[in-house]
């Protein structure tokens, strides 16, 4: 702090500022200060910098937009009843069994934040707002819907009891889950951190639809509610600079700053509101702080010396939490009592009046003013930092206490105080029964509530299950260039996919709905030709001449650009894909997103977002480029994917394929288009692609059904080989070619006949087998069903079955239960490494020699060939029996 060398001059400057504020207003004062600061910087004078503003409300009382006294009163009665129902729902569930759990405190702290929004700002209907609701607040949202008449008492009674409820029609899901309640919840949010990043990219996608002329989204807002503790998740803040860079003024974050996370204070030794203000202001957001309730306004106005503000700023969050866990006398002593002048300021106030000095997040006047300012703000996203109390209203049972988040019960005395505090129409006897409350049909409150939701366009949350429009997807013949093979030419399946994508982009019926998404790898995947042809989406257009402007495939940004280039940002690209893949529901416009990425940086890096996509009932294509552990041969341990298909297999509505040939890619993509956009099935596709070039055959006649079910006979090697030993060989992706070569070795060197199957999806084969197995268990009196694997292999001459893939053994091992006879699996367990492909495949023991060796070993075990054939193969193919297991190196 510098010394004041001339107090008189300082006083003149301050008085001049006061005069400008008094006669010309804050805007003029801001302009003058900004000009003086800019001039000082130009002249090289050091200018003090602060990322934060004083620990006060951003909007002063005289600038607040306000509700009428009648609106405030009716809103309070509605909110009080919702509070009770939310509390009763959790208490009743846990009175029956503590297994069910649930959360009371989060919604009680945020009730006013939601209530003001639902009553006055959140737009419903076909062009309504998108709400990302904090997961732990779900009881309060259900409670509101009950008061509105949208949910029944039976449904509230079955909170977290969904198994017998029937697809969201009975019991209520624990948190916001579109998969479980498909006509209600818009977005899944309880995996903390995912809601904020998904909200950002949903807001950007609304701009995308608008600029491309596909939908009018001008009046729509995306509201994301999150907790202050949730902002520690990297995804919560990781994309906020993109939101300001893209000028997403349709995005509003509401951060419930109750100062507590699950176990204790968020920032006990600091101030989370000030910290977040600095972060968001630095990222270019409009920040609105709602810290103090209206009761503080007279005290703040009387703070002519700044001592009250000083006390507000020096108290840390751990102290503020402590204050609100006690009483008014404690606040008088510990907060105001630090300075005699502050004690004198509140000398005329009773302890109850001091205790009633509320936080801004519980004051509907302050929240209404903040929301009104936020929806009117242009050019920037807005974050509202609202200070609240966790467990507000719970009193001795948890208000402001570290144990609050886990509370599932309340003492009788606390319930009585809760009733009295919120003026609920309940007798002492009724309290014990925890009844759900509703307004009478002819009540002022219910009429007002319905009037408000009608004015705002309809009820929320509400989700559209099917888009009004069903797309006319192209027939398989549209991809003729990929069906006829590539005789004399070598290409990769990645190149085949890019050609399919170009065909779709030019399709007159659906071309405008295709959304190519890449995370800064377009050139790797051979997609740079799309830059000029279809453009990269940018609201600002292109304010520069690109360095490669004189080239055919120059880098072109445009407001109506069709590609989404997300940079080195897999989480953001996945959130962008989710926004496009749910547009059929959120905007009633089906879009067809294709997100292509290095497969290792897909499921492994963003698995939580992939799971959220499944919950969201997303529809679209994920393309795992340069897939497999031995195809991306130069990149090494962290780049080579050997397990993405295992991860994909656990997502119930993810349909995953590992194709080898261009015609397989075409068949799979066309079927995905049919299922997702013609039939509107709630699935999404994961298709792995390789960068290895080789010649592709033409589509075998009748192979389409087998490609889609998971396997088909690619080479008939056993017909006419009566008396010869035979095997069944399965392969997928690039290793299928090693399997074919292994079959050749078996025939040439050992006289073993081999059928070769292209196993396009071990995951789909497993699901089919599980379904058959389950049906047989539940229908003991009926003829048993056979799995598709059994149908395929049972129709062949038999012999042991060998499977080899470029993924860990677990991938192909999924079908072991359904394979008749001996089954041996080869895979790439272990860490990746760099080398030539042939060396990598030998190292991981998935090359043609190991395929042949595995087949001979199984045949010898069955007694079909002499045991010395195995030893001969080891010597012939130069295999080292003493070589360590690959997964140990």
Image (tube, rainbow, N blue to C red):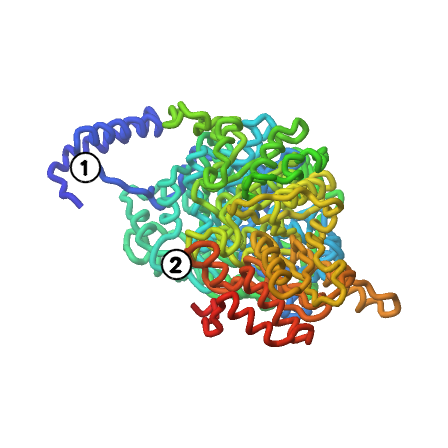
Residue at 46% across / 35% down in the picture? 64
Nearer-the-camera pick, 630 or 199: 630
Location of residue 12 in the rendering, given as x and y in whole percent from the top left corner: 19, 31
- Residue 578 in which image quadrant: top right
Which numbered disc flags the more N-terminal residue, 2 or 1?
Answer: 1
In the image, residue 505 sits, relative to residue 113, either above or below, namely above
Location of residue 795 in the rendering, given as x and y in whole percent from the top left corner: 78, 61
Q: Is residue 537 visible?
A: no
Instruction: Give the numbered dot on residue 331.
Output: 2
In the image, residue 171 sits, relative to residue 243, either above or below, namely below
Tag 1 residue: 46
Packing grade of label 2 (10 A; few <14, some 14-19, many >=20) is some
**Distance between the alpha carbons at the discs numbered 2 and 1:** 40 Å
Nearer-the-camera pick, 393 or 617: 617
Q: Secondary structure at mark 2?
A: helix
Going by the image, does 338 lie left or right of 423? left
Q: Quadrant of the C terminus?
A: bottom left
Going by the image, does 323 lie left or right of 583? left
Location of residue 180 in the rendering, given as x and y in whole percent from the top left corner: 68, 54
């Amino acid at each position: 702090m510098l010394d004041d060398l001339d107090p008189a001059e300082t006083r003149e400057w301050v008085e001049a500022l006061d005069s400008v504020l008094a006669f010309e207003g804050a805007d003029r004062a801001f302009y003058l200060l900004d000009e003086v600061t800019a001039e000082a910087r130009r002249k090289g004078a050091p200018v003090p910098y602060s990322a934060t503003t004083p620990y006060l409300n951003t909007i002063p009382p005289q600038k607040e937009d306000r509700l009428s006294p009648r609106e405030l009163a009716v809103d309070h009665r509605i909110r009080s009843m919702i509070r009770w129902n939310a509390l009763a729902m959790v208490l009743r569930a846990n009175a029956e069994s503590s297994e069910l759990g649930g959360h009371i405190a989060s919604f009680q702290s945020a009730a006013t934040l939601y209530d003001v929004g639902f009553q006055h700002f959140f737009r419903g209907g076909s062009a309504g707002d998108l709400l990302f609701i904090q997961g732990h607040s779900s009881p309060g949202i259900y409670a509101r819907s009950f008061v509105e008449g949208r949910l029944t008492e039976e449904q509230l009674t079955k909170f977290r009891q969904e198994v017998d409820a029937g697809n969201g029609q009975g019991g209520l899901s624990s948190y916001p889950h579109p998969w479980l309640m498909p006509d209600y919840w818009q977005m899944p949010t309880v995996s903390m951190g995912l809601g904020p990043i998904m909200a950002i990219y949903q807001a950007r996608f609304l701009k995308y639809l608008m600029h491309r002329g596909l939908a009018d989204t001008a009046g729509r807002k995306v509201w994301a509610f999150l907790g202050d503790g949730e902002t520690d998740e990297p995804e919560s803040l990781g994309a906020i600079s993109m939101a300001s860079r893209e000028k997403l003024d349709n995005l509003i974050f509401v951060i419930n700053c109750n100062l507590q996370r699950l176990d204790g204070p968020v920032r006990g030794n600091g101030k989370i509101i000030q910290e977040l203000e600095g972060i968001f202001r630095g990222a270019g957001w409009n920040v609105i702080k709602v810290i103090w309730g209206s009761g503080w306004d007279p005290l703040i106005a009387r703070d002519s010396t700044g001592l009250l503000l000083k006390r507000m700023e020096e108290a840390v969050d751990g102290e503020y939490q402590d204050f609100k866990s006690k009483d008014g006398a404690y606040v008088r002593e510990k907060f105001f009592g630090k300075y005699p002048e502050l004690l004198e300021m509140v000398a005329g106030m009773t302890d109850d009046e001091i205790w009633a000095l509320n936080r801004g997040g519980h004051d509907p006047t302050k929240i209404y003013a903040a929301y009104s300012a936020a929806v009117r703000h242009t050019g920037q996203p807005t974050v509202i930092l609202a200070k609240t109390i966790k467990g507000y209203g719970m009193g001795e049972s948890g208000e402001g206490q570290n144990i609050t988040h886990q509370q599932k019960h309340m003492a009788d005395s606390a319930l009585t105080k809760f009733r009295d505090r919120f003026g609920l129409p309940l007798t002492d006897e009724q309290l014990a029964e925890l009844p759900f409350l509703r307004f009478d049909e002819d009540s002022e409150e219910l009429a007002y509530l319905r009037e408000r939701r009608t004015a705002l366009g309809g009820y929320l949350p509400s989700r559209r299950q099917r888009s009004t429009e069903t797309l006319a997807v192209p027939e398989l013949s549209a991809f003729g260039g990929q069906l006829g093979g590539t005789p004399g030419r070598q290409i990769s399946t990645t190149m085949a996919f890019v050609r399919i994508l170009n065909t779709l982009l030019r399709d007159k019926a659906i071309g405008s709905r295709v959304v190519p998404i890449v995370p800064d790898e377009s050139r790797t995947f051979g997609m740079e030709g799309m830059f000029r042809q279809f453009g990269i989406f940018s609201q600002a257009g292109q304010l520069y001449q690109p360095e490669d402007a004189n080239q055919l495939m120059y880098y072109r940004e445009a407001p109506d650009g069709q590609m989404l280039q997300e940079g080195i940002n897999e989480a953001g690209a996945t959130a962008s894909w989710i926004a496009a893949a749910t547009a059929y529901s959120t905007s009633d416009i089906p879009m067809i997103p294709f997100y292509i990425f290095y497969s290792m940086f897909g499921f492994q890096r963003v698995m939580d977002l992939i799971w959220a996509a499944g919950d969201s009932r997303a529809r679209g294509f994920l393309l795992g480029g340069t897939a497999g552990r031995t195809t991306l041969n130069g990149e090494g341990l962290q780049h080579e994917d050997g397990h993405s298909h295992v991860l994909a297999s656990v997502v119930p509505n993810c349909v995953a394929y590992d194709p080898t040939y261009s015609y397989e890619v075409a068949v799979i993509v066309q079927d995905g288009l049919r299922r997702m956009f013609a039939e509107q099935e709630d699935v999404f596709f994961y298709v792995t692609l390789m960068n290895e070039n080789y010649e592709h055959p033409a589509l075998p006649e009748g192979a389409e059904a087998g490609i889609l079910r998971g396997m088909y006979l690619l080479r008939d090697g056993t017909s006419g080989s009566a008396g010869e030993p035979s095997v069944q060989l399965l392969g997928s992706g690039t290793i299928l070619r090693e399997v074919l070569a292994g079959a050749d070795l078996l025939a040439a060197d050992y006289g073993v006949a081999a059928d070769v199957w292209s196993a396009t999806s071990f995951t789909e084969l497993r699901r089919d087998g599980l379904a058959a197995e389950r049906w047989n268990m539940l229908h003991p009196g009926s003829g048993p069903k056979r799995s598709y694997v059994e149908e395929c292999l049972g129709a062949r001459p038999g012999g042991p079955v060998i499977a080899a893939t470029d993924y860990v053994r677990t991938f192909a091992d999924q079908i072991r239960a359904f394979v008749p006879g001996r089954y041996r699996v080869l895979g790439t367990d272990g860490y990746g490494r760099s080398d030539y492909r042939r060396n990598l495949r030998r190292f991981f023991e998935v090359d043609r020699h190991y395929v042949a060796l595995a087949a001979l070993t199984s045949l010898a075990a069955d007694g079909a060939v002499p045991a010395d054939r195995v030893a001969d193969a080891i010597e012939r193919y130069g295999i080292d029996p003493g070589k360590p297991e690959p997964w140990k190196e």
